Image (cartoon, coloured by chain):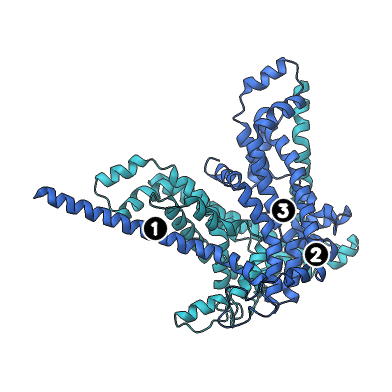
């Protein structure tokens, strides 16, 4: 009996922190999202009124919210497949029996993941500079005219996607590499005996064997990419012409610049619901793919 | 005759293998250059004289390497203060959260208490909630506790993490029950068992979690940005973002700031990357 009491002392500190500083605020966010909590309520709680779903209704009528949602979906829809392709390509190269100096290459490819996002976003802001930036210099060598990467609404989001792929691909690369190394060698030998080409071996051995890990990695990456914030904050401040305002950037400005905290809570909740729904759809697809195999 | 043909075929196979090896390693060099170039460029530009990088074609190496940018950062821009803030906060958050997460992770794996499995399932479900959902009320809560605009406000939410508890639990499951039972029969208290037997056995996962937490808190941006308003308290990422808005043209100075911000974590990673990579694969592939 005493042992059970002691066990509680082991978990109590962590559970207290998680309850008070995570579970309670999440519940409070739901409650706040149906109030008109703003700078006046911040000064005096008596100014607070319950407004029901008004925050949500008004949000869905704000063009900037739809713009932010569209930008975020663009970032996810283009950025995630590119990231996964880069991760898978790098993992296949590193895992190849022909690769030399694997440890050195692995460290170099992984280095961007551990860097501070603000610091490397500053670097890329200069690399992407119109006049003196290295990216335009390299493109110039190919005969391409200078592009105003971060000042042209057509190119700002692609530039941020390029940056995000560079920053993140190493993370999934490591996980996929571990998955590749778990594929039994005999499967490849059997396929080779049957005369399968390298491409066929990739299509019929590697991809199906990696399937479950690819599904997990894909789901986590989508959830992560929906939380776009620091990149536009540092590189573009949401511009030009609001072309890089993400949902979280919108929430940050709404909440901590204009102090419309009720509104900001509603934005956070809508984002959570969206991520949750997309995750469920992905899981269903992953399961169906599993059964189909 | 047939032997000759086989020899030719073997030579063909070998030639194709050499070509494939060249292709694989060539692509690896290209990919590694893509990954490392911005970081090396940052280092090179940080050593250039002010204005030197704003030239066409963009220079790769400084004409005369100088530490002037670093000197200006620390003397005029208060970088020493931000560096100290970052070190203090990252170390404190890591040390405290390790204690909380390791104790809880071990208990969820090896100790019995009422509601253990139900609580664990609830925590697993809570993993899908993005942290930003909690940010607005958390800000108000900390404001009422007087923790907004203080070191405490940055540290407190990082004190325990569901992910950390999961990681430790996963690893602690492999501790043999007999070992713990034998110690109990010898009359050791649960705290004694934890300190003398469990913690040494968990050492590898503790180092892994320490590296994760240290890098995570060092690199964290959104929460410190929200909770800290006093410049004196800024961490490096928050300070760098604010400097970058003021000094848009000062390429060389900003690169020195980026080096100061990102070099410490890169060095920690290089020294302990084995643990980091292990934790990454433990968390997802086997989990």
Question: Which tint was used for chain A?
Answer: cyan
Nearest to N terminus: mark 3 or mark 1: 1
Residue occupying image coordinates x 63% and y 51%: B269
Quick one: label 1, few (<14), some, or many (20+) residues within 10 Å?
many
- Kindly give the residue lying farthest to the left in the view shown: B1
* Cβ atoms under marks 3 and 1 closer than 8 Å: no
Whole-angstrom CA distance, mark 2 to mark 1, is 59 Å
Q: Which mark is residue B24?
A: 1
Depicted A96 relative to depicted A182: above or below: below
- Quadrant housing residue B278: top right
Q: Which mark is residue B217?
A: 3
Question: Which tint was used for chain B?
Answer: blue
Q: Is residue A35 visible?
A: no
Residue topped by disc 2: A36
Chain ID at mark 3: B
Is A229 on the left or on the right of A158, as rendered? right
- Residue A214 screen position, x and y as percent: 47, 51
Depicted B191 relative to depicted A220: above or below: above
């Amino acid at each position: 009996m005493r042992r059970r009491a002691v066990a509680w002392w082991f978990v109590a500190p962590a559970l207290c922190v998680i309850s008070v500083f995570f579970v309670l605020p999440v519940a409070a966010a739901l409650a706040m999202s149906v109030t008109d909590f703003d700078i006046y309520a911040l000064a005096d709680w008596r100014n607070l009124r319950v407004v029901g779903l008004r925050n949500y209704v008004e949000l869905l009528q704000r063009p900037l919210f739809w713009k932010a949602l569209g930008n975020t979906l663009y970032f996810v829809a283009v950025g995630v497949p590119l990231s996964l392709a880069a991760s898978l390509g790098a993992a296949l190269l590193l895992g190849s029996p022909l690769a030399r100096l694997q440890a050195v290459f692995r460290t170099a490819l992984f280095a961007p993941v551990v860097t501070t996002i603000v610091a490397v976003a500053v670097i890329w802001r200069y690399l992407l500079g119109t006049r003196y930036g290295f990216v335009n210099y390299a493109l110039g060598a190919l005969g391409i005219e200078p592009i105003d990467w971060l000042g042209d609404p057509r190119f700002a989001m692609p530039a941020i996607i390029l940056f995000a792929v560079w920053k993140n691909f190493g993370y999934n690369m490591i996980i996929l590499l571990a998955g590749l190394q778990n594929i039994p060698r005999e499967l490849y030998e059997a396929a080779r005996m049957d005369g399968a080409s390298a491409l066929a071996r990739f299509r019929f051995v590697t991809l199906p064997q990696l399937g479950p890990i690819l599904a997990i990695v894909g789901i986590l990456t989508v959830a992560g990419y929906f939380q776009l914030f620091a990149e536009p904050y540092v590189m573009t401040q949401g511009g030009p012409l609001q072309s890089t305002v993400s949902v979280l950037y919108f929430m940050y400005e709404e909440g901590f610049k204009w102090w419309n905290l009720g509104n900001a809570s509603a934005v956070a909740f809508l984002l959570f619901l969206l991520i949750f729904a997309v995750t469920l759809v992905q899981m269903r697809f992953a399961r169906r793919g599993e059964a189909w195999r | 005759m047939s032997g000759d043909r086989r020899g030719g075929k073997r030579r063909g196979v070998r030639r194709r293998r050499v070509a494939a090896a060249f292709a694989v390693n060539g692509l690896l060099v290209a990919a590694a250059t893509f990954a490392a170039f911005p970081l090396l460029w940052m280092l090179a530009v940080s050593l250039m004289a002010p204005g030197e990088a704003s030239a066409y074609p963009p220079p790769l190496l400084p004409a005369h390497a100088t530490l002037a940018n670093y000197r200006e950062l620390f003397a005029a821009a208060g970088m020493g203060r931000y560096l100290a803030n970052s070190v203090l906060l990252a170390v404190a958050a890591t040390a405290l959260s390790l204690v909380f997460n390791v104790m809880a992770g071990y208990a969820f794996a090896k100790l019995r208490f009422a509601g253990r499995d139900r609580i664990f399932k609830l925590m697993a479900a809570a993993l899908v909630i993005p942290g930003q959902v909690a940010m607005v009320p958390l800000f108000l809560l900390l404001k009422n506790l007087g923790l907004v605009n203080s070191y405490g406000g940055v540290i407190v939410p990082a004190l325990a993490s569901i992910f950390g508890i999961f990681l430790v639990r996963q690893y602690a499951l492999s501790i043999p029950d007999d070992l713990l039972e034998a110690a109990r029969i010898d009359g050791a208290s649960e705290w004694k068992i934890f300190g003398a037997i469990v913690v040494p056995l968990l050492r590898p996962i503790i180092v892994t979690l320490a590296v994760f937490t240290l890098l995570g808190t060092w690199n964290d941006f959104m929460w410190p940005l929200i909770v800290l308003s006093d410049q004196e308290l800024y961490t490096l990422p928050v300070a760098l973002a604010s400097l970058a808005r003021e000094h848009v043209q000062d390429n060389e100075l900003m690169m020195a700031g980026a080096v100061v911000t990102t070099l410490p974590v890169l060095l920690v990673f290089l020294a302990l990357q084995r643990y980091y990579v292990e934790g990454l694969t433990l968390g997802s592939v086997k989990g």
